[in-house]
Amino acid sequence: MSDRWKSVLMRTRLFAGLSAEQLDILLRCFNAAERVFAKGDLLCLAGQPQATIGLVLDGRVLVQKEDEAGSRLIIGLFGPGDLFGEVSAFAGNGSWPNTVVGDSAGAVLFVPFDKISRPCCRACDAHQVMAANMLRILAGKALMMNKRIGFIRLKGMRQKLAAYLYDQYRQSGSSTFRTHMNREALADFLNVSRPSMSRELSRMKADRLIDYDRSIFTVTDPKRLAALIQAEH
């Protein structure tokens, strides 16, 4: 593996707290497979056997679910350092629950999940640190899924958008922040119509609740935005 990708891995949550030497030991143990992809490339297909989890090295991947009618639901958009497939892998499903495609050109590292869940015969410190990191990641994913359900359950379009944008505002610690999703992905994430969502964003901008330029948003009136969410409950 190139030094470029190793520097990416050193900054991920999965390998947090490890030295470069410990990372090298784990990579030799993993026998992981690196894959370069283009936008639209199929990386994982729902229903196919799953023996690995994915770690994005570069670019973005889209995790999505499609029903029999062809309707698409965005599960998540993941960028460098993000994991996908770990929840289903450790739940013991045995198959990919969702389809994963390239949202841009990039690269992903596929790691056999049994190499993470089962310590090596030496029970080295690196494996133990990584296993603890994985537990924290899984807990974070569970909290995020619960948060998304909260967004979707809100009835009004403005309330859904207000809840999502206010959450991003609080997480970023700044009134101006960049979202990782384009309009189509955000509409699917909130389970709403893209044209309707775009119209509502324009109205919220006209009402001076928010401002935006493509994926960069500014919350101009946090108190009013929060009040919208409270009004729904």
Image: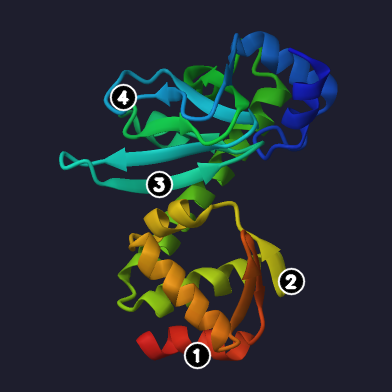
Crowd tier of the residue under label 3, counting other residues whose Cα lies within 10 Å: few below 14, some 14–19, many 20 or above: some
Crowd tier of the residue under label 4, counting other residues whose Cα lies within 10 Å: few below 14, some 14–19, many 20 or above: some
Residues under labels 2 and 4: Cα distance? Answer: 40 Å
Residues under labels 1 and 4: Cα distance? Answer: 42 Å
* Residue 183 versus residue 176 in the image, above or below: above
Count of numbered circles on the image: 4
Identify residue for label 2: 174
Say which residue appears at 48% left-offset and 18% top-offset. Answer: 114
What kind of element bears circle 1?
Answer: helix
Q: Nearer the viewer, mark 3 or mark 4?
A: 3
Residues under labels 3 and 4: Cα distance? Answer: 16 Å
Identify residue for label 3: 75
Identify residue for label 1: 227
Q: Which mark is residue 181?
A: none
Q: Nearer the viewer, mark 1 or mark 4?
A: 1
Amino acid carrying label 4: it is Ser
Say which residue appears at 60% left-offset and 8% top-offset. Answer: 31
Task: Compare marks 3 and 1 and give the one earlier in the sequence.
Answer: 3
Q: Can I make out residue 72 in this image?
A: yes
Task: Compare marks 3 and 4 and give the one earlier in the sequence.
Answer: 3
